[in-house]
Image: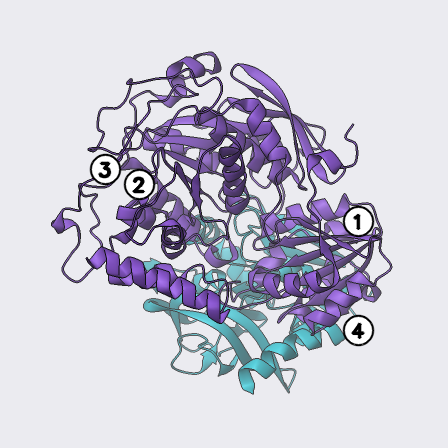
Chain colours: A purple, B cyan
Amino acid sequence: MRFLIALWAGKLVMWLVRVLGRGKGSSLPGMVALKLDPQILRRLARQPRRGVLMTTGTNGKTTTNNMIARVVSAAGYSTVVNTEGANLITGVTAAFLKRATVTGRVDCDYALLEVDEASFPRVTRQVRPGIVVITNFFRDQLDRYGELDKTITLIKDALQDMPGDGSYPGQLDQSSLAGNGLFADGPLSGQPGPAVTDASGNATRTGKDGPGAALPAAGAGTDEPSGAVHRDGRESTVPVEGIPCPAATRLVLNADDPLVAQFAQTTGLTAVYYGLGAHAGVSRQAAAAREAKFCPRCGSELVYAYYHYSQLGNYHCPGCGFTRPEAAVEGLEAHAAGTAGACRIRFPGGGRSLVIPVHGLYNLYNGLAAFTAGLLLGIDPDTIIAALGAYTPATGRMERFNYRGKKTVLLNLVKNPTGFNEGLAALLAMDGPVDVLIAINDNDADGRDISWLWDVDFEVLEEGHRPVAQFVCTGLRGAEMGVRLKYAGVPVDKIRVCDSLTDAVRLVLDGPGRAACLLATYTALWPVERILSGYAEREQKHVANLPSVS
Amino acid sequence: MLQICHLYPDLLNLYGDRGNVIAFTRRCRWRGLEVTVRPVNLGEKVDFKEMDFLFLGGGSDREQNLMAEDLMERAGSLQAAVEDGLVVLAICGGYQLLGRYYRTLEGRTIPGLGLLDFYTEAGRKRLIGNVAVEVELAGEKVRIVGFENHSGQTVLGSTAPLGRVLAGNGNNGRDGGEGARYKNTFCSYLHGPLLPKNPRLTDHLIRLAMQRRGLPGGLAPLDDALEQAAGDVMLHRLLR
């Protein structure tokens, strides 16, 4: 009964928020429902027939999860997805609430959840994922004071509690992957029934074409044991019976990030790696925002053959031998193709060429992660490639607009040095001249401390500012952004500080550039997007209408 | 020609504090004053006496320990340089390290370099937020702004504070002092980073460094409209 009251209250709040038009309402309903029944997520999240897939990490969670959602939907499955970047336990709960019937039934094949790094342990106490995708670890502006190490440890601990399939990940080579149940041949969980504890090896399918393999999630149909929650409503810290318990949790890891790659060994779970091979744009030099100078295992300084960006690259440790694992899914010859990213993908059993209609190397990583997850779910590679090619970015993830048919406008969220550096790289690769808007807020959700701006490599603009017609700095801390650009060596006459967001957007739209690039922190993004969409049209570009790719 | 020593840039590269070195450098170069920046990482040799400006930032616990270990071995020559009037800016963890000791919550005492007379104790509550401070530079009262984020609470002995807190916590949230100042050594909890948006403080440090090196002439004025605007945003917000 408590469950139903919480469910109805959550749904009511969801409806109220929508009717009253107060915000997007993505977390409040979950908050209310969890308050009334702290176990509600547990009961909702064990219902997806084929299991739960989670994506966590610092950058690229939203994009990766949305890409996976595209892929899974293209294969004909129904899903629950938290698509709006509402990635705390409240947002995850709200995503299920939205889908649940009034009796609390969630009718879907997969739940695809983007989970905030810091919330990961809390969410996984109620939801057991069959697959966990980890994108990367960078210091966010919110956790630049030693919190990253703590976050990584928390995720590691949460993963260590999960059941593995006993195979030692380091021993898997590519040729054995397909036959190892890692790709396509995973066990099916079938219909809801009693908790599956010994599903491994049962009921395999060829998975060559959909519907492919389900995550080995259990469909637990029974009620919660009453001892799961403390009297005062606090969550139990130990896993309790009744959690949908997949036979094995598998990891999809970014091979190029040493902070992520270490997870296979430290958690003992089976891992499949994706990564980018060397390409024309790799750097031999470390960027300023590099996080992991030191081996996560032994503390020696890592040696890199090359860097993609930040600490992503081809590394090895001279101290303990920790080295970039071979990527089962590897992107080769990565390059920009107009406003799209492209590479050739090599994977066990084949190769394909991938083109995704979003800017930036980091989006190729997101695409590779989604490709790998798709393969693990047994989805046909051609279906995956087509779905990724038709991907449309979420708000502010290199979203494209068109202003009066004459100006291409890109809108992108910036929230930490690594992401901002990549945003700058994408900006400088655009056909100039470009009008640039940078909106910096320092509200709680942005991080009140904006000193991270000084860890961004704006110094590339000292030489590279030429294609930029003007920098319009706005937001609560726009003036400070102007100072940052000045001290990076941008000529002062190109820097303009404008307090009004509307005026700032108008300035770049009507500026002399042929294109515009708008970069905004979290709380500045929505207002900028709203103003922008009043003047410019959102483009729905698919690969087919992209400029020809050579 | 001025020589800047940037201590442990590889280790302490995540707090935006390198902006202090950027600001010092730029403001010299804009005036035609030559500067070289000498990054000094763990174990690398440096003669502090030859330097004109030394910057020391802070890091997370792990980085802080590595840096403390390395600096301990240089304590003697650093002390001599400080006494000789070397211009030093130490921020947050770097600040704490120059004092007598740091006492953890468990009561363990970690010795500092002891160059300045103060100590720091771990507090239960982290002091986080924007700060405005009034400092006296060459006889003039100047308002500076920054962002503090520290759990250590510093108590000054005979050392003078850098300034008086107008808004925020400062050294310990109790006595109204922020930072410390001894000869040409300036310590502060303020990130932000401190120097770019407080150009008068930056110029004060440059002037002191020039005087010590015996370089003639004053500093040509610069157009600081942007810096002024950035500082004013915060002063208005905090002192309204």
The x and y percentages for residue A469 are 84, 57
Q: Are marks 1 and 2 in contact (CB under 8 Å)?
A: no
- What kind of residue is marked 3? Ala
* Callout 3 secondary element: loop
Which of the two residues, B82 or A363, is positioned nearer the viewer here? A363
Is residue A362 placed above or below B55 in the rendered structure?
A: above
Label 1 resides on the chain identified as A
Residue under circle 4? B222
Instruction: Let me know if marks 3 and 1 both belong to one chain.
Output: yes
Rate crowding at label 2 as few (under 14), some (14 to 19) or many (20 or more) other CA atoms within 10 Å: many
Evaluate whether residue B53 shows in this view.
no
* Callout 1 secondary element: helix
Q: Are marks 2 and 4 in contact (CB under 8 Å)?
A: no
* Labels in figure, total: 4
Precedes in sequence: disc 3 or disc 2: 2
Instruction: Tell me the mark number nearer the camera, choosing from 1 and 4.
Output: 1
- Residue at horizontal 38%, vertical 22%? A169
- What kind of residue is marked 4? Leu
Instruction: Let me know if marks 1 and 4 both belong to one chain.
Output: no
**Label ID, residue A220:** 3
